[in-house]
Image (cartoon, rainbow, N blue to C red):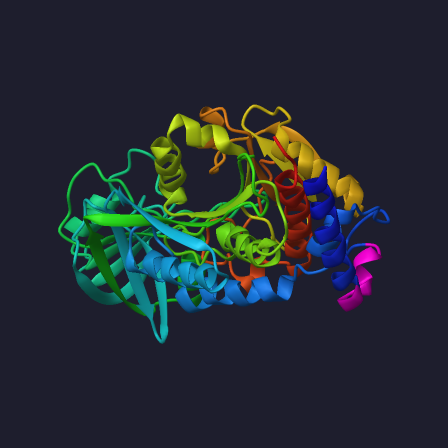
Amino acid sequence: MRRRSLLTGAAAVAGAVTLGLNPAARAQRPGASDVPDLALGDYPVVGRVRADRAMEHLRVLSERIGQRIGGTESEHRARDYLASVLRDLRYQVTLQPFTVPDKYLSTLTVGSDMWHAGASRFGALGATATGQVVDLDTGASLPADLTGKVALLVNVPAGSTAVLDAARLGAAAVLVGRVSVPPAGKTSAFSPTLTANVAVPVLGVAQVHVERLRAAGAVTVTVTTTHLAGLTSYNVIADRPATFPGRDHGVVMVTAHYDSVPGSPGANDDGSGTVLTLELARVLRHLPTHKALRFALWGSEEQGLLGSRYYVNQLADAEAARIAGVFQNDMVATSHGPATAYWLLSVDGGDNATTAQVAAAAARLGYGSQVHGPVPRGSSDHVPFHERKIAAANFSWRGEGGPHQLEPLYHTPEDTIVQNVSPDRLQISMELIGAAAYRLACTRG
């Protein structure tokens, strides 16, 4: 009983200080549909969490570093930044390395602009080519001579030999693009698969690249391709023990992945979840808890949940049993207008410790009408934990019609702060996860 009194008293003091600094903590939350009815432990979280602080980190990740491809130098720069922030917050930081598959990447230089894309492992690698772009559409009809040209092929049908034919006709390089039409989202960069090897670079470009090249007309581009082998990716893990002595009550995890797909600066996917994790690490670091706190940022999620799977696979049974809940945050700040629903996504659609705490936090903060679920959904780093029978869920802003309704700029070069991030939605996400994670961390047993 005395420990509970200490916890309540410490939280009350933190809440009183917070309210002194920010009386608006008791007011209706931004974007909320109802007036809040906050619990004592909510005050030191919602009164201190700040989207503008998180956005400072997001500018570093998505603008200064840009694309963060698993196992490459760009991901390692992000790793070092994240570890530095967490160490400055006085967490015990561990970098967990693991090997990842080779990457086939490329760049296109168009005037003063440089774009990032994928490369085909069946084309020339480590190569550079320059030429004037010629738009060949689907490749159904090709000119007799493409010597020195950079061929642009779009929406090539299955079974077509257009890429091989363009190379045979002398193209210096081949750009392969895919263009979708609404309501489908825009297409991303990729590594094309061919039925035979060719001696020229073959790039898989994003839809926005196709649109810009077509708008520019007969523009000259320089392309390069790179094969990166022997790669190591890293999880960044930050720990803080429980503040009360006595028996072990387990650990609460707040997580996100910090890598992105080729060509994308990954502002919302998943720079937003990453900076949410950093900001909650700042806000929760000195708050009293019965459970330990762990903040984990996964590498190489985009290659098949590689970082989180590696982490879970390394857990001894006793350590896995200590984890009371994993709050996985993926795409938590899109500015896409129709993405007005905040979804609770568990693998099997069932309620667990994390979804229940977020739903309860939403009711206390006045966000109940925005929150939907839980409903079944995988495709993020909560999956390996669920498979290990650990309570986990993914949390994300998506369309009202279902969690499959992602923003059109998902996985594209246009997933930028300016085009695809809402600080208001980021603020709501941080308040919900912060209040829920802290409530779970304050429970015993």
Could you tell whether 13 is left or right of 194 in the image? right
Q: Position of residue 440 (x, y in %)?
A: 64, 38
Could you tell whether 97 is left or right of 50 in the image? left
Could you tell whether 213 is left or right of 346 in the image? left
- Magenta-highlighted stretch: main secondary structure? helix
Q: Position of residue 368 (x, y in %)?
A: 78, 40
Residue at figure coordinates x 50%, y 62% from the top left = 89
Q: Which residues are magenta?
A: 20-28
Q: Is residue 65 above or below residue 164?
A: below
Report whether residue 17 is seen: yes
Residue at figure coordinates x 38%, y 35% from the top left = 309
Camera-side residue: 364 or 113?
Answer: 364
| Residue at the farthest right position | 35
Residue at figure coordinates x 29%, y 51% from the top left = 71
Q: Is residue 245 above or below residue 210?
A: above
Camera-side residue: 111 or 266?
Answer: 266
Q: Quadrant of the N terminus?
A: top right
Q: Position of residue 151 (x, y in %)?
A: 27, 56
Camera-side residue: 331 or 359?
Answer: 359
Could you tell whether 225 is left or right of 381 in the image? left
Q: Position of residue 87 (x, y in %)?
A: 44, 61
| Residue at the farthest bottom position | 112
**Quadrant of residue 14 within the rendered picture:** bottom right
Q: Quadrant of the C terminus?
A: top right
Report whether residue 329 is seen: no
